[in-house]
Amino acid sequence: MTSLLPGVTGVLVLADGTVLQGVGVGAVGEAVGEVCFNTAMTGYQEILTDPSYMAQIVAFTFPHVGNVGTNVEDIEQMSGSAETAARGAIFRDIPTAPANWRANADLPTWMSRRGVVGLAGVDTRALTKRIRETGMPHAVIAHNPEGRFDLEALIARARAWSGIVGLDLAKDASCLQPFTYEEGLWAWPRGYTKLDAPRYEVVVVDYGVKRNILRALTSVGARATVVPASTSAEDILARKPDGVLLSNGPGDPAATGAYAVPEIRKLVDSGTPVFGICLGHQMLSLALGARTVKMEQGHHGANHPVKDLTTGKVEIVSMNHGFTVDRDSLPAPVVETHVSLFDGTNAGIALKDRPVFSVQHHPEASPGPTDSLYLFERFADLMDEQKG
């Protein structure tokens, strides 16, 4: 049994029995999940509210987190409870006090309100190195202000957790009823803009969509109608959309694909322009005959270099995924359009004979750079061609 040091109010207990000790932050309690690391230097609020992080505990490699506080505008979730996003957060230092004009709460208080369990005072470099060498472990993160932990019970819970492979988490992250969205990207000094006159009608299949994806659509003139993940292709096409976007989301693409892939095939066959992002990219690939596989450490950060093979340009992008498309399984007439320059994994595909394409990264780029926003213009161009 590991003995706790004086002043310990938080722990991270791995399934192999390793116990990391520190200071509890945010919500009191415990949460089980898969531990991953994120290398972004900004955007911690967007990261912690991204539905793609559902059932995961995020270790931040950047040491100073909390500087800009939190606000009510930078939440990426569109629907569902706080449980449909990151379940825990790990920091090297205790989050700093906010110093930003947009802040209305500090990070620990905001985490407590959302039920996100945090742990500070951890050697995040050592944890990151461990994940790189052995993969993303199952773990329980716990916070008790009195420092009382049943470590044996926490280890048993971490070992008993089934993991993400085989889990359809999109059904819980998805909306329950269709709705429309018309807010655009943030612009100084107006803040978030509004759609004046829509040029396109786009149906967004919600597997756990990020708010900024919808804003990016609005900013190219599209009014988005968001529909639940289980919506049939017939119901989508009955809305006569100019295009369909398959959103990001959490979980195993093969599990969600059990009901989503047949509908995606119908959408592709209809000739309607289709754009997939992250989980949407993976499930589009499945629908076209490719395979997806679980990654050892995944891609999580805002500094990932990706090459657009159609232009030859290298972009710095935001990524968040634990599964990848097996590039060797891509069948004709699918072509690879983007590739990760970190490890050579697939980062985008397109069909030669249909207005269909997708990317593994997040072109809406929040947090992260804006190198890939052009993909929404590319989607708009496909819709213009189809309408013409």
Image: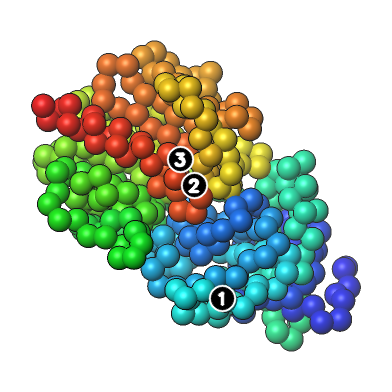
Quarter residue 372 falls in = top left
Q: Nearer the viewer, residue 295 or 160?
A: 295
Residue in front for this viewpoint, 185 or 338: 185
Q: Earlier in the sequence, mark 3 or mark 1?
A: 1
Quadrant of the image containing the N terminus: bottom right
Q: Are marks 2 and 3 in contact (CB under 8 Å)?
A: yes
Instruction: Tell me the element at label 3.
Output: loop
Q: Marks 2 and 1: CB-CB under 8 Å?
A: no
Q: Label 1 neighbourhood size at 10 Å, few (<14), some (14-19), many (20+)?
A: few
* Alpha carbon separation for disc pair 2 and 3: 6 Å
Looking at the picture, which amino acid does disc 1 mark? Ala
Labelled disc at residue 371: 3
Q: Label 2, label 1: how many angstroms apart (C-alpha)?
A: 22 Å
Q: Position of residue 299 (x, y in %)?
A: 59, 42
Sequence-wise first label, 2 or 1: 1
Which amino acid, by three-letter code, is at mark 2? Pro
Q: Which residue corresponds to mark 1?
A: 99
State the SS at label 2: loop
The answer to whether residue 153 of the structure is visible from this angle is: no
What residue is shown at x 78% (from left), y 48% (from top)?
130
Give the image location of residue 181, x and y in percent.
23, 57
Q: Residue at x 32, y 49 (%)?
A: 216
Quadrant housing residue 232 = top left
